[in-house]
Amino acid sequence: MEWHNARALMEWQLEMGVNETILNAPIDRYALDPSPIKAAKKETATPVIIPKVDPVAIAKKLAEPANSLEELRSAMEAFDHCELKFGARNLVFSDGNSKAPVMIVGEAPGREEDQQGKPFVGRAGQMLDKMFAAISLDRGAQEAEKSVYITNVLPWRPSQNRDPKPDEIAMMWPFLQKHISLVNPSVVIAMGNISCQALLGEKGITKLRGRVRQRHNLDILPMVHPANLLRNPSAKKHAWADLLTLKVRLEQI
Ligand code: URA
């Protein structure tokens, strides 16, 4: 069976509530002859020495020489130390206008993003587009001033849309840092908690949102994630206030 089909079937079973695998008839494993297991253990007793690698150092080495977004993308494609890569269909790099003054950094791709290879194209993405349209910004705009550039902390979808792990965020940080320096935006939007964790080293979006902070020589504005607004529409008033803060900031630049 083709790998992606097998994975999709397994994911479907998980979504249906399968959390255990059992056989049609019980097996009394105490009654089984243990000798083959013992023999197998003996054979594999020789210790296997796995050389230790530092994924963060490897990521830095790959990201450092990239002088363009294309080179950065190739460097990320060559990085094999994030296990999410092997469960994803596509590397989700970016969308929008790389000359835009606003760079939005989301969390990680979901199912639709993984399928299309573009960030924020599912329901949360539609909400994100509506949010920025409210201050006349559009990722599809030709004019840089009217556009936005979008990427994520992680370029590969975590299975079951689980939260990215701290070690995954740490190993992809050198790529994100290089990504931001190549785009050189006036304002970076830290979209949601995971993005705040990566960009500011802090969590707690309700406390952090709405105030521009200087970190890594960047102006960073934390905002409530659009997926959060879908679950909790009453938070839209905060999003609106934060968009106005961004609008004023852009007018000052
Ligand atoms: N949520 C994100 O944070 N990023 C995406 O690309 C999609 C959903």
Image (cartoon, rainbow, N blue to C red):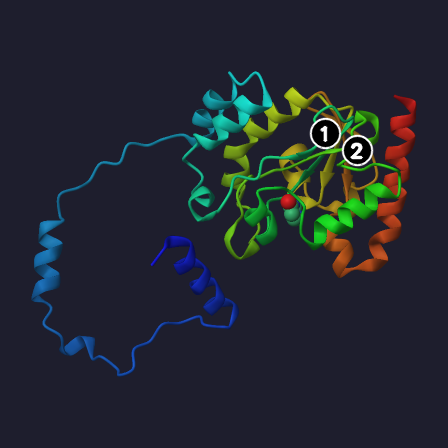
Q: Measured from the top left, where is residue 40 in percent x and y?
A: 11, 56
Depicted 112 relative to depicted 62: above or below? below
Q: Measured from the top left, where is residue 13 in percent x and y?
A: 46, 69
Would residue 196 appear left or right of 26 to someone viewing this image? Answer: right
Q: Where does the C terminus fall, quadrant-wise?
A: top right
Mark 1 belongs to which amino acid?
A: Asn
Q: Which residue is mark 2?
A: 141
The furthest residue to the bottom: 25
Depicted 99 relative to depicted 131: above or below? above
Q: Are marks 2 and 1 in contact (CB under 8 Å)?
A: yes
Q: Nearer the viewer, residue 252 or 90?
A: 90
Mark 2 belongs to which amino acid?
A: Ala
- Name the residue: 9% across, 72% down: 33
- Name the residue: 86% across, 34% down: 246
Depicted 10 relative to depicted 124: above or below? below
Q: Which residue is mark 1?
A: 97
Mark 2: secondary structure:
loop
Q: Residues within 10 Å of mark 1 (few under 14, many from 20)?
A: many
Would residue 78 appear left or right of 156 to someone viewing this image? Answer: left
